[in-house]
Amino acid sequence: MNLREQNHYFAKVIVQYLIEVLESERPSMALSLKRQLTERVTKQADMDLIQAEQWARHYNKFIPGLYLKLYERVTVQDFGLYGYVVAASSSVRMGLTLSQQFLAMTTTYYEESLVEASDYLTIVPGINADDDAVQLLSEDFAAGYWALLIRIIIGHRADMDKLVLDFCYPAPHYVAQYRALFSGCTLRFNQPQTLIKLPTSWLNEPISLEHSCIDLLLSNQLISNDGLEGDKLSDIERKVSEVVISSHFTKSTVPDVAMEFSITSRQLRFYLQRNGLSLRDIVLRARMAVASKLLENTELDIGTIAETLNYSEASAFVRSFKRYYAISPLQYRLQKLDPFT
């Protein structure tokens, strides 16, 4: 079974790593889960987040701290299109704000909110401290948010001790797992509420993820295989598109792109002209490819998409999109999501 073919992206991520953990620690249970997955494929049942969470909750009875082990395996590319958008943010503050839209896709158990005070910004999950599964939910929240923070938003810092994770229960017998995963962070147990705190002084700093890692967030389908005239995409157009997209469209001029390939602007123009291409057309195609994916596969608003594509304002993006597709971004989204077609 190819889990990447399932219709719910993050459910696939959870189940993929759940199988890895089970194969390592409970091989017989891994076989059982694989049989259940095969049955779902046979019945043509789509993977969904509720089912993935039910499996995680079940196997957590046999593997304490299961969510810690799942999120420890999460990589940059697992964040997909939402990760690309978060990485395009101008600051940690903006990245955290946008992350709310992504994290709403990763759990059905609770919702998070951001509360900013003078010294700290607090990330608060709507977890009831009296819930029988409070420890499981808290581990899901803390480990999931930690993965996003470390992989994309703030990275590993010299002052990681200023990142505080509070848990509203006593330290479990496997607390060593907490210390290993949240290495360098300040952990506090028996607190009134489970939450994460980070200094407000971090909020105006740039996102930590290097542009060289951003292409890992993108699937191969993001750049169309079809060229400008309907033929297959040439090697030069694909490579230039990858540079432009991985820079979040900040490198879209001939000098910038030429520098990425360690050639002169004149050489780049020669190679483009030889293939009947212009950088302007390549940048436009790349922008529209990313825009269409974000409109189809996320609920991001038009302004956020425009900012991600490095447009000066949303209206400029809308005009460009309408010239390319002959319909507005909103019409495009409604058309693609139309349940009656």
Image (tube, rainbow, N blue to C red):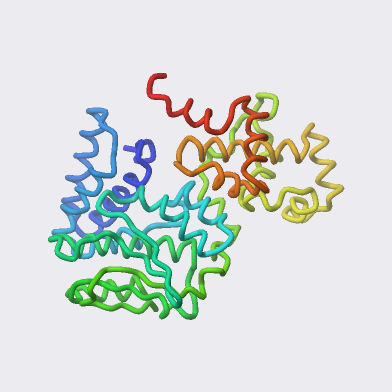
Viewer-nearest residue: 30 or 167 = 167
User: What is the count of numbered marks?
Assistant: 0
In the displayed structure, does residue 340 sit left or right of residue 225? left
In the displayed structure, does residue 219 sit left or right of residue 255? left
Q: Tell me the residue at 57%/39% (across/down).
A: 291
Q: Residue furthest front?
A: 118
**Based on the displayed image, in which of its 4 quarters is residue 284 positioned?**
top right
Q: Position of residue 14 (x, y in %)?
A: 31, 50
Q: Quadrant of the C terminus?
A: top left
Q: Quadrant of the N terminus?
A: top left
Viewer-nearest residue: 249 or 326 = 326
Figure check: 225 above or below 185: above
Q: Position of residue 217 (x, y in %)?
A: 51, 50
Figure check: 62 above or below 238: below
Q: Residue furthest top?
A: 341
Viewer-nearest residue: 166 or 277 = 166
Figure check: 14 above or below 155: above
**Based on the displayed image, in which of its 4 quarters is residue 4 positioned?**
top left
Q: Position of residue 194 (x, y in %)?
A: 27, 68
In the displayed structure, does residue 212 sit left or right of residue 114? right
Q: Tell me the residue at 64%/40% (across/down).
A: 315
Q: Residue furthest right?
A: 266
Viewer-nearest residue: 254 or 110 = 110
Q: Tell me the residue at 57%/40% (across/down).
A: 290
Q: Position of residue 166 (x, y in %)?
A: 29, 73
Q: Tell me the residue at 62%/29% (across/down).
A: 226
